[in-house]
Image (cartoon, coloured by chain):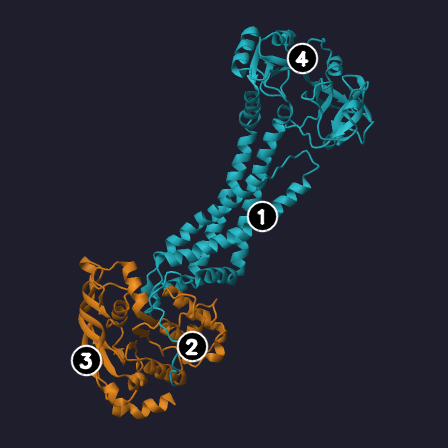
Chain colours: A cyan, B orange
Amino acid sequence: MQLTRSTSGGSAASSPASGARRKLHMAPKLAYRNLFYDRLSLIVTLTGIVFSVVLVAVQCGLYIGSERTIAAVIDQTDGDIWIVPVGTKSFDDPSLLTGRERFSALSAPGVASVENIMVSFSSWRKPKGGATTILLVGSDWTGDDRALRPWNLVEGTLEDVRAPSAVAADRSYFKELGIDKIDDTAEINGTKVRVAAVTKGIRSFTTLPYVFTTRERAQMLMGASAEQSSYTLVRLEPGADANKVREELARRLPDAEVLMRDDFRQRSLDYWLFQTGAGAALIAGALLGLIVGIVIVSQTLYSSTKDHLAEFATLRALGASAGYIIQVILLQAVISGLIGYLVGMLLSLLILWASQDTTLNIVMTPGLGVALFGITLGMCVIAAISAIFKVTRIDPAGVFSR
Amino acid sequence: MSKSTRDAEGRAILEARGITKVFGSGDIEIKVLKGVNMQLRAGELTLLMGPSGSGKTTLLSILGCILSPTDGELVINGSSTRGLNAEGLADLRRKQVGFVFQSYNLFPTLTAVENVLLALDVRGSGAENAHAQAEDALKSVGLAHRIHAYPKKLSGGEKQRVAIARALAGSPSVILADEPTAALDSENGAAVMALLSEVGKDPNRAVLAVTHDHRTLSYADRIIVIEDGRIVDSRRNDGAANEGSKSHAVN
């Protein structure tokens, strides 16, 4: 056999490298081919990543959803300072103030307006029999655009809720409330009410349905006096020093707690998410998902690397730097992570879509999507460490027959 | 290249000076190489022969900058390996040495041309002309029609020719072949040796093949025999005596 002389000429090794020289990029090709060569191994890897992504997405989505649910009414209320009964743990933990808070607050310097809010656990008797507990919320929205009111109305109007015996209920709780549609009737604490408006997506973290009505009707249904309320919401005059006003109100009202809006919000979140352990369970679930993902990906990448060890030794013998070989393994991890992330996110979005009209509030935000992408890639890179550890200890002399 | 030109000794491209290699320490210390001195000359195919356990593979690993000697010095094209760490050795290997392995060691997930391109990539070759270089390398070993074939679709002889093309990619000055015919039948073995002999004619390159196969003797310009970690014989091959069999095998 005659060696045919090369026609293209040029020695890759001997020719000087020019600064702008394009790279061949064979490492990504080798990583991609190795990955798809072991189909079974790839499926196991992707299953691990997808499982992890879905679990972390749902757990984090539930956590964010829980935060939003717990703080939903506070977030919907335009107020600066909340006057709450002493020892109140959250918005959903109502008791009654003494009744003089409104006037004390109104006479304090820097206060623009004051709104009383009634919140109470009440008994809801279903039209077809049976009863359940609800969280009745009463507020004054007449003439004050900033007052607390039912939001996300999909049927009926705020005006309809002001009609005699009228209440607003959320569609996601229809089954639990034993109603089917607007205008259905039920009883609250033995008094007949009519569902005059329907909201969508106002969920409660306690799973007790919120039912909205006017403050006067709520007071009547609860048997409270006209002065009594669960919370007194204070709005400040423009330019007023919120801390000074809060301190003055606290001085005037020793039998109540005076909290800035953000403090009341945080107190509600801390109580439900951490004191009850619900949030910790969600975070633990997300961490578990991450750990399972890391273990599965780590196992499969390590096993795949072991299968290709002879090839990596050959690469090393050919003169590949440790960095080149690490690049191949990391690329395998990153490609797996990308595919796993895309499939996992698709599944997570399907789960979100399926839970839309349920009491389960799972939220996916752009920030969570980006964070999940980073977490997935990070997880895959961490999982690649054991494989890298193995491959950097290859003895290239192993490529020779002995 | 004419026979007379080949008879003139080329410059030493690789030189091993007093190479010693010891594995283990204390009671389990094994001295595998005991002061090896040898040269690989440009334009020559050298055969390294010796019985099992004589230190051939260890010597090949050191000559290929895969192992560091315990003592002694290796100089390739003026570059000494003394004091180089693993990455330094890899760098010298990348620039100066091409390998041909007994088991071909091709990447099964890459086609023939991609296997050659990978070697070019490892050697830092740019994308410009790389495909042409890789295809030329394959053409030069007679595999123009098998460029896009995966290794599993190639015969043993074809795989070894791809491996030779890969070793040639980037034009290293030293080609080291480890039992290149051991896994081949006599016909393919002869073809591969003929090819290595052709590769060795390059005046800027030296080729060393480790072999047990005495049928390969006829292709050698020089034969080095190692026994018990020492070079016991190093001589120019008598070309005239073997010319007939070489021509026969090449054809």
Q: Nearer the viewer, mark 3 or mark 1?
A: 1
Name which quarter of the figure residue B17 lies in: bottom left
From the viewer's perspective, is residue B141 above or below residue B64?
A: below
Residue nearer the viewer, B23 or A275:
A275
Disc 3 designates what residue? B233
For disc 4, the marked residue is A229
Both on one chain, marks 4 and 3? no
Please determine if labels 2 and 4 lie on a single subunit.
no
Count of labels in the image:
4
Residue under circle 1?
A: A344
| Front in this rendered view, residue B126 or A279 | B126
Label 4 chain ID:
A
Within-10-Å neighbours for mark 2: few <14, some 14–19, many 20+: many
Q: Is residue A346 visible to the viewer in this orientation of the structure?
A: yes
- Name the residue rendered at 67%, 42% in the picture: A353
Q: Amino acid at mark 1?
A: Gly
Tell me the amino acid under the disc marked 2.
Asp
Where is residue A17 shown, x and y percent of the image? 35, 64
The mark found on residue B136 in the picture is 2
